[in-house]
Image (tube, coloured by chain):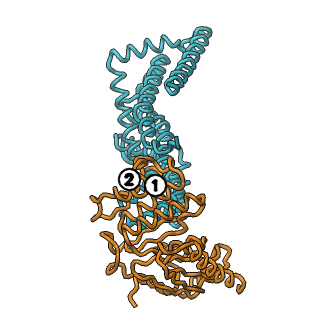
Amino acid sequence: MSYLLNVDIKERIFQTQEGASLHAIGQLNFSLQPSSFTVVVGPSGCGKTTTLRMILGLDQGYKGSIEAKLDTSSGGHGKGTTAAVFQEPRLLPWRTVEQNVRLALPEPLKQSSFEDLFDTLGLQEVRSFYPSQLSLGLARRVAIARAFAVEPSLLILDEPFVSLDEPTADRLRALLLRVWQARPCTVLMVTHNVREAAELADNILVFSKRPTRVVDSITVEKSREQRDATYIQHIVDKLKNSVQSEDVQS
Amino acid sequence: MDGCEVTIKRLLITLLSIVLLIGLWSIVAVTINDNALPTPSAVWAAMVVEWRAGDLVFHLSMTLMRVALAFIVAMAIGSAIGIFLGMKPAADLFLDPWLILLLNIPALVVIVLAYIWFGLNEAAAVGAVAVNKIPNVVVTLREGARSLDPEFAEMGRVYRFGRFKRLWHIVLPQLQPFFAAATRSGIALIWKIVLVVELLGRSNGVGFQIHLYFQLFDVATILAYTMAFVVVMLVVEFLILQPFETRSNRWRATAT
C-alpha cells in the first residue's frame, strides 16, 4: 500500500536530570495515506506531542524509523515540505501578520499571493498588525495561514484549537476544513477532544498511556457533509470506549 | 492631544530640575567664592573662549572619534563572543575564568600595558578602551543568548529558515534589549575611559585638555570641557539611541 508517512518507532526514553528514565513511547506503528486527514486522540500526557516532534525532526532521540515520501505525493509548490501549527501560535512578535506568513515561504513561492488564504481566514484587516494586538483565536488563524501558505505535502497540527471558547473553536474548525479543501495536503492532527476528531477526521488513531502505542484505529466511513449529530455521537461513543478501556487497563 | 500634553509636562519638569541644579551650583559657588569652584557663568565664559579659539570643537571631535571607534570594536567583538558563549555551555564553562579575569583588571592597568606593549599610538589607545568594555558586552549578550526562546528556533527549523533568516528575524530581535543595555552602559563607560587614555598618552582630545588645565589649575575650563562633552553625549542619546530604540520596540504596543 502506498503511504505518505510511515512511522515505525521502537521506543523513546527520556532521561530526567535526577537520572531517572521515563519510557514515553513504546512500539508505535502507523502510516498516513496521501491527502488523508488523520486525527490522534488519547489521554493527556500520553506522548502525542512527542510523536509530532519526532515526525517534525525536532526530537531525534528515538529508536526506530520515520519514513516520509513527501516528494511523490500530494501538495502544491511546496512539495516535499512539512508545515506545522503548534499548540501556541509561535508567531514572531516583532513581525507583522503578513511578514510572519511571508517569512515562512520557501524560495519558489516567494512571489506567490496568499490573498485567498487571508480572505478565507478573515485576516485581510489585520495583515499589518503585530501578533500582540491579536486575540488568541486570530493568532491561531495566522498560524494556520502560515502553514497552508507554504503549500506543504504534510501538515502537522498540535491541538490547534485548545483553550479557545467553543463557538470560536467551532468556527476555526470549519475554516480549517475550507482551507484544506482549497489547498489539499496530508494532515496529521493531535487533539484531546473526541468530538473534534469525529467531525474532522478520515482516520482516527487512539493512543495509549505511556509507553505510547496505537490501541485502536478507526476509519470514519461517511463523508464530512453526511455526518449528522447521531453519526458523530456514534463515533464519539466508540472513541470514548477505546480511550476508557485503555484507562482501565493501565 | 493627551500624548502632547504629557510630553510638554515632562519637558517642563526636566527643565525645572536642570534650572534648580544650576541655581544650587551658583549659590554654593558665590558663597564659597573660591577659584576651585567657579560659577556657572564663569564656566560658560571659558567655554566661549575655547569655542572661539577652535580648540573646543577640535578636541571634542577627537574624543568623539575615539569613543565611536572603541564602541564599534567593543560591540562587534563582545557580542560575537557573548552570543557564542551563550549558545555553547561547554565553551562558556571553559572560558568563564578568562572572562572573570578580564572583568576585574582595572582600566588603568590595561591602558598602561597597551601603551608599553604597542607604543603611544592611536591603535593602542582605542584598543585599550575596547578591551576594557568587551567583557561587559560579553556578559550582557551571553545572558541574552541564554534566554533565546527555543520555540522560535523550532518554528524556524520546521519552516526551513536559512542561516541569515534565522539570525535576522529570530535571533537578533530577541537580543535587541540586551544590545540596548550594552550600548547604554557601554557609551557612558567608554567615554570616561577614553579621557584616561588621552590623559596618559595622547596629545589631543578632552582628556588631554583637562590634563593641561589641571596643571594650570583652571577649573572653569576643565568644567567647560566636561559640560561640552556631556552635551554631545546627550545629543547622541536623543538623536541616535532613543529613535532607534523606539523603532525597534514598535511591535510591543499592545491591543487597542
Q: Are marks 2 and 1 on the same chain?
A: yes
Seen in the image, is A68 located left or right of residue A165? Answer: left
- Element type at mark 1: loop
Q: Position of residue B126 (x, y in %)?
A: 38, 42
* Chain letter tied to cyan: B
Say if residue B74 shows up in the picture: no
The answer to which of B115 and B149 lies nearer the viewer is B149
Name the residue type under label 1: Leu
Residue A191, numbered circle: none
For residue B85, above or below residue B40 = below
CB contact under 8 Å: marks 2 and 1: yes
Q: Please tell me which of labels 2 and 1 falls first in the chain.
A: 1
Residue visible at 64% across and 83% down?
A: A242
Q: Colour of chain A?
A: orange
Q: Helix or strand or loop: what does disc 2 sit on?
A: helix
Q: Is residue A202 left or right of residue A78?
A: right
Front in this rendered view, residue B219 or A128: A128
Q: How far apart, in angstroms, are the residues tagged by discs 2 and 1?
A: 9 Å
Residue type beneath disc 2: Gln
Q: How many marks?
A: 2
Q: In which quadrant will I find the N terminus of chain A?
A: bottom left
Q: Residue furthest bottom?
A: A1
Which residue corresponds to mark 1? A92
Question: Where is the C terminus of chain A found, in terms of image quarters?
Answer: bottom right
Chain where mark 2 sits = A
Label 1 neighbour load within 10 Å: few <14, some 14-19, many 20+: many
In the picture shown, does residue A72 fall above or below A122? below
Residue B235 visible in this rendered orientation of the protein: yes
Please provide percent x and percent y for residue B156.
42, 63
